[in-house]
Image: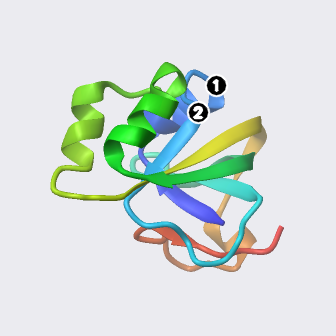
Amino acid sequence: MLLSINPEHVENILNETKRFEFRKIRCKCPVQHLIIYCTAPVKMVVGEAHITRVIEESPEAVWNETKDAAGISKGFFDAYYNGRDKAVAYELDNVTRYGVPKTLSDFGLRFPPQSFSYVDL
């Protein structure tokens, strides 16, 4: 799965201070790898990670389980999930930063996904 992620969060994932990627909707197919597309101004695929598990619960339950390695503030988390009754967190491990960033076309994509795209490794 290739995800569009903003540069601040990408850097925190790559330096492993952010071990969870939060989403409002869970992808339907089971996935084991996350390909990291860094949004503007970078606009490149910069790394990948293994997904060790997916947590899908209430926002409060997800925060309680992920807060020590969330890489975001409680305020940011609460604003992101405002009005939602479900939160999704992908737990990341074995994070790899590409030595040379890749283009979306390397993964068969012409445009960055709004949320995510399924891709073959």
- 10 Å neighbourhood of mark 1: few (<14), some, or many (≥20)? some
Q: With respect to residue 96, does 26 lie above or below?
A: below
Q: With respect to residue 114, does 42 lie above or below?
A: above
Helix, strand, or loop for circle 2?
Answer: helix
Query: In the image, what residue occupies the spot 50% across and 19% down?
Result: 68
Q: Amino acid at mark 2?
A: Ile
Q: Which residue is mark 2?
A: 13
Q: Which residue is mark 1?
A: 16
Q: As drawn, is 54 to the left or to the right of 32?
A: left
Residue 109: image location, x then y, percent = 62, 78
Residue 37: image location, x then y, percent = 57, 55
Residue 76: image location, x then y, percent = 26, 34
Is residue 11 in view? yes
The quadrant in which residue 120 appears is: bottom right
Query: In the image, what residue occupies the spot 65% across and 62% down?
Result: 103
Residue 69: image location, x then y, percent = 54, 24
Are dots 1 and 2 in contact, CB under 8 Å? yes
Instruction: Tell me the CA gap for discs 1 and 2.
Output: 5 Å
